Image (cartoon, helix red, strand yellow):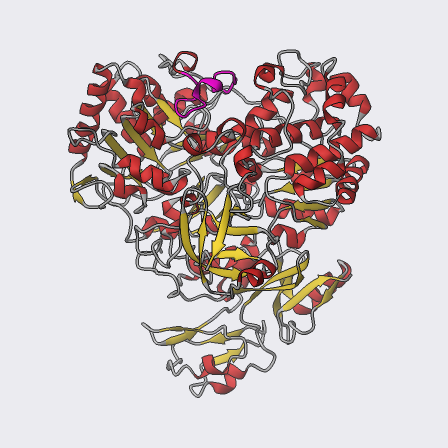
Amino acid sequence: MKQLSIMVDLDRCIGCKTCIVACRNHHGLVNHETAMPEGMSHYLRVESELTGTFPRLAEDYWVVMCQQCKKPPCIKACAAGAITKDAQTGIVRIDREKCTGSGACIEKCPYGVIQFNAEGRFAHKCELCHDRVVHGQEPVCVEVCLADALRFGEREILQMQAEAAGKKLLKKRSTQSILYVKRAD
Amino acid sequence: MSESKWIPTVCYQCKAECAILARVEDGVVREVKGNPRARGKMCVKGMAGITTLYSQERLKHPLKRVGERGEGKFVRIGWDEAMNIMETKLRELRKRGEGHKFTYSMFPHSTTDPKWRFVNAMGGFITTGLPHCDSAKIMAHLHTFGCFPNHHIAPMYYTVPKGGVMILSGRHPFGCLDDACVPRDILDAKERGAKLVVIDPIFRTEAAKADWWIPIRPGGDAALFLGMCNHLLTKGLHDKAFCDKWVREGDMAGLMAFIKNKTPAAMSKICDVPARDIVKLAEMCAAAPSVSVDAFKSIMYGNAMDWGHAWSIFLVITGNLDNPGGQPMPEIAPMAPVAPVPPPPNLKELGYHRTGPNRARFDHYTFFLQPTWYAAQAVREGTLKVFFASECNPALSEMGSGEWREAMTLKDRSGNYALELFVLTEIMPSETMKWADLVLPDQTNFERWELLYMPWWYNFGHTAAVCQPVVKPVGESRHANRVMIDLGKRMFPEFFAFKDDVEYYDIELSGIGMSMRKMLDGGAIWSPGTVGFRKYEDAGRFNTPSGKIELEWKMYGDIGQQWPSPELPLEFRRDADKYPFILVNFRTIFLNNTGAWSQNNAQLRDPVSGIDANPVLLNPVDAARLGIADGDMVTVASSTGSVRLPASLTERIKPGCAGIIHGFGQTMGKVASRGAWAGDNELIADAGSHLDEQDLRGGEAHVSTRVKITK
């Protein structure tokens, strides 16, 4: 199976969250009129890790979105059969028509990335901008990334590009389809 | 099928004003992104601009105060009544011969902003963020090498060669008032083999990406750079050929005499950077093909003029002027005047510095903009009677918030406010609004016309951009520029004979052979095509009175400021026992500082997509000594104010420092008022009334003020 993916370059990610807001805008996740902090869906989140003690410190930032799991636990959890892994792209998709809003997938997701729309009672998440990539465009987060830290493509090809750039795969974080890389020191 | 298109316009979530595209679908803005004709990037603040546009918190009608100032009570009025109130008061002021007691606080979007024109016609003053934030750097560069500096975007990072050194000194280009392409350009330069050096008391995103982080004592930058200059000059590592050719005769000898005792060891005591590191950085710079210094926010030190001077000297002796990877020197293409031009107030006659005990001394200076000025003092002294403000939030952005509030409510014996009229234009509720007599609903960048004509865009090859309305305005909102043009037409028809703002911009653009139509046809941006390097070689001179680089500021000889002091002003050095911490007010990419529109933006104050907390950052070593645990409520007190905040213990801050984000503390608006956060300017002294030298030598005292922390 071909697996589309995003490669996150930790040497470049600055944790600016531009991708989160651009993603929300593109997918209409926010009611701009009534929005309040802490009440908005988001397909991405930024994580970071500070290590060391003053003045010898290091910090990494990266984004976490649906990892497009190889064997998605959300598919197994969904009694309604609303979640599938697309054979052409490897993208894990939720069919809103079939979704019953049980929330079972949200509980089973090991990455905590599935969102729940209380109004429409359905689960939703990052599908690598399926609407865009089928037209040959990159996912929105990749296009708008302030630091050009994200790259879109086939997982296999992205891995080759990382290798060519002297970046090593962060295996601990890259267990599924999304790749996390950093300069090999 | 619904109509959907990408329309070029300009962002105004912060003052960088990046060129963007807005996707408008059936009359609604759905998406935004960087304009691919202009570097193609847009940051998180800009992306969240749609939330500002459509928020139900938008001010939609003119409001008039009822009750006392500070209570924040208003009634809705019509535009006619609002215009009449402004016209009546301003006419009365002029009739009394007090037109100069009118001040408009604004950020001009071009060198010929129509609001500024109104102020000149009225005979009043403008006060901008420039005196507060930029004067030191502008004047340092103008005095030394005669260029109007690119004060918002210093180096052209895309020109930094392999091995070039990029120094960020108290600067956060990964998100603060910078073109959104800058983070990418810096990271690209690093990938090409350039070195990133970050000088900052707090370890932040830039430090995390740096090749070398130097945690300096706040305000120590002048000392660090003078220490480097000493090493370079005494070891003969400076660019001798450049200095011989371009520095004014006698200045190098003067510099050698001045710099003699500024040894790395001596300077280390001031800046708390080990002498060996000062030497190492100096030698790294001497060996590099280019060095850039980006230090916009560090000019907020109490010794900003000295720092700007020291930094200018460093650029000169390392030959890093107008070279690839060094300090750019912009050329500005002049726009056409819209005749007849109202004359500006006579600063020579009225004085450059209008308030404070140092007022007379200030006339020694040759500033082209009025330097730091304090509204609170001006009200007390009776030199400010009518105050207008747009796109700023003085209740939080003026140093000495407590004094400011007191001044706004100061009354004379008859019970009338000393400040007779206070008018504010706002997009969203702001802290300042509580004290205003009139609050006029302003428009976002998605609803208004504006010609942006900014010298700092020179770096990217273009100088002008057009902000055009892409959707219908919300409610009865009117852009402040249009309001002031309308008021101008009522009061000064001779100076406002043009039809409207668009025609005004058209006349201005004719000076460069452009028009609004041509600009829009060209993607809403325009380039003068003057970008280039070492233009002084072609000109055979620098744009200084002598035509040479003037290291010694001889015009300040009579006030002892011909050479830069490595020390902070006295007021920031005394009482170190009583106030052992130095306050570091820092910025984040998520907020336009005190700007009410970003503080009230739900996406920017959301913890997932923005920031929703502003505790005081303390190093665990300091906290342990004081018995403070993470999350404890503490009192942060300076000699003039205090705030209560939770403490956040982190290794990222240098011991002896207390860090707070600049801009929080609003109580107006559902989003901005979330959390018990405080405004940092509660702690900063109102310089002219409380400080000795800062208003003469400094910018804002954001990174100098001493505080104590108690549980």
Residue at x-position 61% and y-position 52%:
B654
Residue B705 highlighted magenta (yes or no): no
Q: Measured along the vertical axis of the image, is residue B619 above or below residue B235?
A: below
Residue B352 highlighted magenta (yes or no): yes
Residue at x-position 44% and y-position 47%:
B680
Q: Nearer the viewer, residue A32 or B394?
A: B394
Tell me residue B466's x, y (percent): 44, 33
Specify whether B388 is left or right of B137.
left
Quadrant housing residue B326: top right
The magenta region covers B351-367
Q: Nearer the viewer, residue A183 or B433?
A: B433
Q: Nearer the viewer, residue A151 or B438?
A: B438
Tell me residue B272's x, y (percent): 68, 44
Q: Measured along the vertical axis of the image, is residue B185 above or below residue A8?
A: above
Q: Measured along the vertical axis of the image, is residue B581 above or below residue B256?
A: below
Specify whether B460 is left or right of B89.
right
- Magenta stretch, main secondary structure, is loop
Whether residue B364 is visible to the viewer of this picture, yes or no, is: yes
Specify whether B170 is left or right of B518.
right
Tell me residue B661's x, y (percent): 48, 50
Q: Nearer the viewer, residue B482 or B437?
A: B437
Quarter of the figure that contains the N terminus of chain B: bottom left
Whether residue A137 is visible to the viewer of this picture, yes or no, is: no
Tell me residue A20's x, y (percent): 49, 60
